[in-house]
Amino acid sequence: KTREPLADQAAAERAAQRAKEAKAAALAANADLETFRKECQARIAQKLLSKIPQVKAGDVMGEGAEGDACTFHRRKIAIVGAGPVGLWAAMLLAQKYRWTDPSGALRLRPDAPQIVVMEARSMASHCTRTDIRIALSSSTRSMLDQQTRSRAFSSGMPVAEIEENFLRRWRKVAGVEARIEYEAAVQDPQDLNGYDGILWSAGRRSLNEALRKDLGCEVRLGDSQKVIVFQVQELLAGDAWHLSSLDLSGAAQQAGRVPQLRVMLRPGFEGACACWLWVFGLPGELLESLVPKQASNEPRDHLVE
């Protein structure tokens, strides 16, 4: 009676030990397989990258060129100006060359170009332009929200907030490579040597007219159109900042039955007015009938008048 339970217990212990050993062997095999898989991926990626035409100092090099064929030379791009355009370009370049590693973190591909952003302002004065606000259409806001993976954009938002959102997204994608060289004023693109590409986004006044003409990038005026601008002294209801974030064009098109009609509201400031209301896209004959000559600047008590 005693030997039978002891034999069953010993058999169960041996079975448990065998199961434990089998599990350990399986884990070891999985670890070896995972290591082998990662090594294979690295070798394949390196082989593919070695066959990609490489650019160094403006010269395109193929496989078997200068140095080891597996040594990848990254392109170098200079972006002059860390305003909305410069940060937008840096962010889009980083997103184009991003990839997600096995841990889920965003990283840059080995062939991603090296981005150097140069800004004439100091770090303390960057992202501080709250006095300039940009009117954004609904389609533009949707596109910006999609690219930055956020819902931070609204019409009438300050330039400072736009720059902050672009900079935040760029740093998230590019990581430590998202750097800005502050107090780096550049007067002439020819002063930038060793770059495969230069994006000049420092503003219209950053280059003199003679240099612009030599570079073939003169400032040209495009098509113009007549608009009606209402200066509203006081809003009886609503808030100008809230109204500037709304899509007023859709409501105006529906009410006026003019498909090309666009309306933009810009908040005013204390001492001047409550806001300015810009009306675009009105037919020429309608403009002539609505705005009598030498009477368009006369003040009115109500917007209806």
Image (spheres, helix red, strand yellow):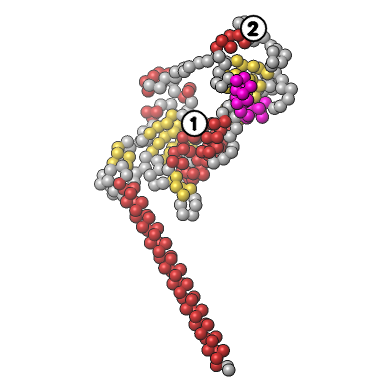
Reply yes or no: does residue 241 show up in magenta.
Answer: yes
Reply yes or no: does residue 101 show up in magenta.
Answer: no
Q: Which residues are magenta?
A: 240-257
Q: Residue at x 62, y 5 (%)?
A: 294
Give how far across and how far down residue 208 sits, in percent. 44, 20
Give how far across and how far down residue 203 sits, in percent. 48, 26
Label 2 Cα neighbours within 10 Å, binned few <14 / some 14-19 / many ≥20 = few
Vertical position of residue 97 compared to residue 103: above or below:
above
Residue located beneath label 1 in the image: 85
Tell which residue pokes out farthest to the bottom in this image.
Answer: 1
| Amino acid identity at mark 2 | Ala
Vertical position of residue 30 compared to residue 147: above or below:
below
| Amino acid identity at mark 1 | Val
User: Could you tell whether 214 is left or right of 293 in the image?
Assistant: left
Q: Is residue 125 visible?
A: no
Give how far across and how far down residue 78 sits, in percent. 42, 34
Give how far across and how far down residue 21 sits, in percent. 46, 76
**Which quarter of the picture shows residue 246?**
top right
Given this view, does label 1 or label 2 mark the residue nearer the observer?
Answer: 2
Please say if the residues under marks 1 and 2 sit with CB atoms less than 8 Å apart: no
Q: Residue at x 40, y 64 (%)?
A: 33
In-front residue for pair 246/36: 246
Q: Residue at x 58, y 34 (%)?
A: 153
User: Could you tell whether 31 is left or right of 287 in the image?
Assistant: left
Label 1 Cα neighbours within 10 Å, binned few <14 / some 14-19 / many ≥20 = some
In-front residue for pair 267/71: 267
Vertical position of residue 80 compared to residue 300: above or below:
below
In-front residue for pair 183/257: 257
Q: Secondary structure at mark 2?
A: loop
Numbered label tally:
2
